[in-house]
Amino acid sequence: MKFQLLLGSLFSQIKGRHWWLSILLWIALVAPAQASVILRVAIERGVNQVRVGSSTTATVKDSVGRTLGQLPAMNAFYAQAVPGGVALDKWQSGLFWIEPAGKGFVYIGDRWYRGRTLVVPTEKGLTAVNWVDLEEYLYSVIGGEMDAKWPQEALKAQAIAARTYALYEREKQRNSNPIYDLGASPDRWQIYKGVSSESPGTYTAVDATAGQVLTYKNKIILSVFHACSGGHTENVEDVWGNALPYLRAVQDYDQNIRECNWVKTFSPAEISSRISGVGNVKDMIPEAFSPFRSVKALKILGDKGTKMLQGEDVRTALRLKSTRFNVSKGADGSFILQGLGYGHGLGMSQWGAYNLAQRGANHLQILGHYYRGVSLTPIQAK
């Protein structure tokens, strides 16, 4: 499906804040009533302009819920930040809703999504939010997080974990973020690519587990997951500092996965470019380990200073697959890191779930293995 692009002039990024408190009121006035659980997923954040459209004729509404007109199907428009709000085609308003007719999809940035679009000004520009039914959101997430051809029991486990995580984030954001519940980028949230990652396999897994979440003492858990741990997951306090009774280290079943066995070589200059304040790097020394040999603290020694990386910073600062590695030196002075795992090592290992499903475990057994002492509970819409 090809868009015809209708380009408007680029307005300056909005800088004022006097209208900010009224955004909550605008959203409350024009948000349609819903019986199902609706997620607010930020697709674009803090941009000067964002491309929007619809696969069917779409109704455009302003900040007080008034219908301004329609956007023709299969055309793209640029919503742009202007003083006091947003400009879209021939209209200006404090914000815009774009609601497709029938079963139409909306277009945001460069992808198609289910649901509707809210374009709202924020302090740093525009944010485009996809308001989407939770179960339809999961149709996409499962295909983004796992191969849709994997065993259904692994996909069902992923569906429940992803649904639980989304609602955990939704609860957490309700009191602090008036615009969205979570984003779409995999570095912080779940992978959400819109309809492009949906498939019959994801529909089946989501529908078979509809409305089911994981709870601990009647509270939704932080159901994090990762690609693979390399043989053993971690206790959460050894990675993020705060203990949680359900994120406990368990034996894993992903040692046979090629992506979980890695080697990365750094020159001293490469490390210096990523770790500021140490100068020319002379040595890298793991200072503390988890009980399962993941590096909890890594000392970087340079001719201008020393820096200690701790917890997740060990992985993110050096852009490593995991923190479970050994350090050795090459003959040329390089540092060779040989590691296991891919991700933070907490909660469910996706490759572990795959292997357990291949061995005959069902999705409840998989979830019960990785999240200790939890219950399967129907969601309570709020």
Image: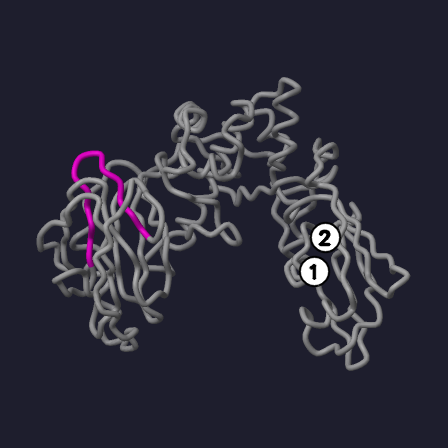
Residue type, numbered disc 2? Thr
Mark 1 lies on residue:
314
* Vertical comparison of 231 with 304: above or below: above
Q: Earlier in the sequence, mark 1 or mark 2?
A: 1
Residue 184 x %, y %: 43, 50
Q: Which range is magenta?
A: 96-108
Decide which of 353, 36 is in the foreground and name it.
Answer: 353
Residue type, numbered disc 1? Val
Asked whether residue 298 is drawn in magenta, I would say no
Q: Is residue 289 left or right of residue 224?
A: right
Decide which of 240, 295 is in the foreground and name it.
Answer: 295
SS assignment for the magenta stretch, majority: strand
Residue 46 x %, y %: 36, 65
Quarter of the figure that contains the C terminus: top left
Mark 2 lies on residue:
323
Quarter of the figure that contains the N terminus: top left
* Vertical comparison of 191 with 51: above or below: above
Tag 1 near tag 2, CB within 8 Å = yes
Asked whether residue 103 is drawn in magenta, I would say yes
